[in-house]
Amino acid sequence: MGQMIPDLAAASRAVPAKFKSNGISNGINGASKKCQYDPTFTQKVIAATGPNAHPRLAQIFPSLVRHLHDFAREVNLTVAEWSAAVDLLNDCGRMSDDRRNETQLLCDILGLESLVDEITSKQLATSTTQTPSAILGPFYRSDAPFLPNGSSIVQDLSPAVPWYEQAQADSAFLSGRVLSTDGKPIENAVVDVWHTAPNGLYEQQDSDQPEMNFRGRFRTDQQGRYALYALRPVPYPIPDDGPAGRLLKMLDRHPNRPGHIHFIVSADDHRPLTTQLYDSRDQWVDNDAVFAVKDELVVKFEPREGDPEARWELSYDFVLGRC
Ligand code: BEZ
Ligand code: FE
């Protein structure tokens, strides 16, 4: 069992037994605990929204308030517990800057980024044959270099690099096509790709890596083909030295993501696709700390013959929906 945050542990001990949740939902407005809490309260908060409220907010805010209030009533949330949650959110804010987004990380371990990604992609989908999306994650850089088709995103690999041998063993050739949902290849599509080094760190997390290591953008040829050299991805822990990591420990959860390669694939007249491909042989593929894995995105790297640059290969076609 993970260690509890002291404040929350104390807050939890301070709750009289009669108020501890029995785990059974009390329904809207705590229906099974009739009259224990003011039954008009939630409606009062909802009704406070004014006639000039932002339209989308006016539409969704009542639901947010209802769910939040029902949660608080259902678990008999105490001031001390609520206060510990406020401290956690404040800590996330304090830790966030343009290199680290701790609040997004908190959403990730709650599964919220993956859920919102699924909702958004299904709302916008124009065909069932489109490649499924997956979350962007916090380590994307929008200005990766454009590289010639067939070149490598691995920079300055020499025996002096601590993970040189693993990089050799994991060297991989990735190729495939970018297609429209009608099966036609898309010329000039951009395949933006990034992954970690064999030490599990993205280049911006690791001052020993060259700028933009393991990142590149490739343009498809007339047949819609892309090709590049990269590495078979390794699993890595999401940053767990902040409040999101503290919560993981309290929940007795691990921080690991299965090895994956990130992609953003874009083309004229098509919706950009943000996705990830997961190595089927990774030990965490069924147990991702941020719940982003989808079956269609799990791939099998095959041994590559006769290429001194790569021991593995992967062929994958991306299918983009039209705008
Ligand atoms: C990532 O895949 O880069 C990632 C996603 C969510 C949280 C942390 C990292
Ligand atoms: Fe990642």
Image: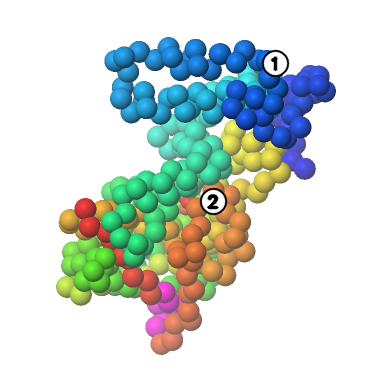
Vertical arrangement, residue 279 with respect to residue 76, above or below: below
- The amino acid marked with disc number 2 is Phe
Name which of mark 1 and mark 2 comes first in the sequence.
1
Which residue: 58% across, 50% down? 289
Magenta region: which residues?
307-314
Q: Is residue 138 visible?
A: no
- The residue that label 1 is drawn on is 36
Residue 309 numbered tag = none
Residue at far bottom of view? 306
CA distance for labels 1 and 2: 37 Å
Local secondary structure at mark 2: loop
Local secondary structure at mark 1: loop
Classified by dominant secondary structure, the portion drawn in magenta counts as loop
Vertical arrangement, residue 119 with respect to residue 180, above or below: above
Q: Position of residue 84 (x, y in %)?
A: 64, 22
Q: Where, by quadrant of the figure, is residue 195 drawn? A: bottom left
Residue 27 lies in the magenta stretch: no
Which residue: 64% across, 36% down? 247
Residue 291 numbered tag = 2
Quarter holding the N terminus is top right
- The amino acid marked with disc number 1 is Gln
Mark 1 within 8 Å of ligand 1, using the beta carbon: no
In the image, taking residue 218 as reference, residue 37 lies left or right, namely right
